[in-house]
Amino acid sequence: MATFSISNLKPLSIETKQENDNLRPFFTQSLDLLCIAGFDGYFKHLNPIWTTRLGWTVEELVSRPFLDFVHPDDREATLAEIDRLIKGEKSICFKNRYRHQNGSYCWLRWSGWFAQESQRYYAIAQDVTRQNRLEREIIEIADREKERLSLELHDGLCQSLAGIAALSSTLSRQLAAHADTTEFVAAAEINQLLNETIRQARDLTHGLSPIGLNIVGLQRMLETLSLNAQQWINITCTLTCDDSFPRLDHEAEGHLFRIAQEAVNNAVKHGQADRVEISLCVKGKEGKLSILDNGLGMSENSGDSNGIGLHIMSYRARLIGGRLSVRQHRRSGMAVICAFALTETLEPGDQAKRTVLIVDDHPVLRRGLTALIDFESDLIVCGEAATYPAALEAIQAHQPHLVIVDLELGNRDGLDLVKDIKIRHPLIPLLVLTMHDESMYAERSLRAGAAGYVTKQQLDDTLLIAIRCVLTGKIYMSDQFQGKLAIKYLERQNLTPNSPLVNFTNRELQVFRLIGEGRATRQIAEYLSLSIKTIESHREHIKSKLNLDSASQLAHRATQWVDNGGMGCPSAFLF
């Protein structure tokens, strides 16, 4: 095993050896990863914590070039950091990934320097894998909370304002019919103000949650940000984009948009800028997002330059492997610049295939869907999953443009998965593909967060039409279901007004279907991973809603509904 010494290039005096012996406990007992590396690219000395953190023995670590342990994607950045050290600069908070003995990677944060006289690198590293994960979770929680607030504003405040605007418009027309000019003008002005308020509220919801980002891309969303800044904040905001700039993955585009959004807000709020310039360009193998303003800059009057906003922007840049610099711009104002590696290799004008993830527990069906989708020139299946947990892992790994979800996933409910995905990945659209008739499940699926509903009897051009419709940011419904939905809202009725099944909760409908398939209470409890008492409670609620007295009547009704294919309601349900 390599042993610690301050230098092995010249004989040590007795005093120096004594000093080394005194320092040895600090080296061996440190919880940080301490190392000395040579100019030849090999570790020379390592403290024991390296074995604890990475699983390799010290002998294994010093026997190979240290770059062999660095993640392939981080080697170029690591070499660049070494060049900085050789030039006399110090490395502070540089991050890269080191391979663990079990094949996984750990994030290390480095501080180091290069000693010219001994031709040695001296460095201290900390394992920040868990910290990175927690920071990422905090960012994701914040983004999900913004999504929740956006939905509440859109579905609550915006809808109420729209209703009030409709009433105001009606009042204006009534006053005009009675030739009451004064009151008509006042009512028309109120209606105009209401419509303007609705537009502002909708823009606010879009700012909280850029729903169309995965459809229209980063450039279009930056255009929207620029236009909104000019319209609502009343500043001059310009955008310049290279035509050759490619589409990036969802996560990278999302973080870059948030960086631009935060930088514009800071420029106006703290810098009191009245002009902001946003640019997105390609520099060699890197992309660069720049936000320049003519505000106060980092002065005493411009707010806290080290505030949480700047820290979050820096962290978002690191999440996508980029680096953020914030500096004074010219004589006044700030320059926020994020440089990042371009992971896409598309030539200008090329059209990337849209990726689809299939979640279904039938392997033959998954194979058929894959063949159907991969045959299309603009679509490709990027992954498959057969279970609820596997679906969440696959989405995190592949970040698809679209997820196709079946409602039957073993002992888990597909509607629960739809809700979970929308919470975790609000920008990824979902298309439900199932055996169940749309009269019972389509509206439930849409309410859960799906953007479309297709039955497995439509595995032809209908499915492909639905996929492309959802990928453009629209909602896909069959013509028949659209008609029923229109009738519901026009007449304020349920889709199947004579069926009490519409009053079932998702879980009650699931239990009802399993009863119809002939499963006993214990079997249903095991299938759904619920207690027998809970299933019995659901059975009682179902009987109450159907006005049934006995378990045999419940079994008969449920069996009749299942035999009918779960479509609408059998004649026995008509009262």
Image: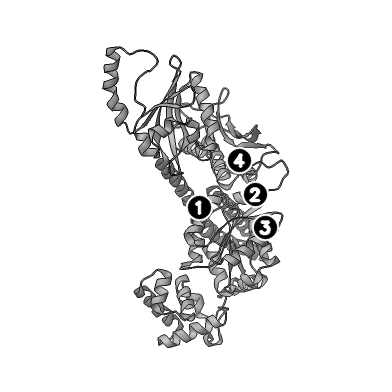
User: Label 4 belongs to which residue?
Assistant: 343
Q: Residues within 10 Å of mark 1 (few under 14, many from 20)?
A: many
Quadrant of residue 163 within the rendered picture: bottom right
Q: CA distance from mark 1 to mark 4?
A: 27 Å
User: Label 3 belongs to which residue?
Assistant: 374
Q: In front: 457, or 269?
A: 457
Q: Residue flagged by tag 2: what amino acid is it?
A: Val
Q: In front: 350, or 27?
A: 27
Q: Is residue 162 left or right of residue 466?
A: left
Question: At numbered mark 2, what does the secondary structure look like: helix, strand or loop?
Answer: helix
Q: CA distance from mark 4 to mark 3?
A: 23 Å
The answer to whether residue 403 is above or below residue 563 is: above
Q: Residue flagged by tag 4: what amino acid is it?
A: Thr
User: Label 1 belongs to which residue?
Assistant: 147
Looking at the rendered image, the disc whose residue lies closer to the viewer, 1 or 4, is: 4
User: Label 2 belongs to which residue?
Assistant: 216
Sequence-first disc among 2 and 3: 2
Q: CA distance from mark 2 to mark 4?
A: 18 Å
Q: Residues within 10 Å of mark 4 (few under 14, many from 20)?
A: some
Q: CA distance from mark 2 to mark 1?
A: 18 Å
Looking at the rendered image, the disc whose residue lies closer to the viewer, 2 or 4, is: 4
At which x and y percent is residue 377? 72, 54
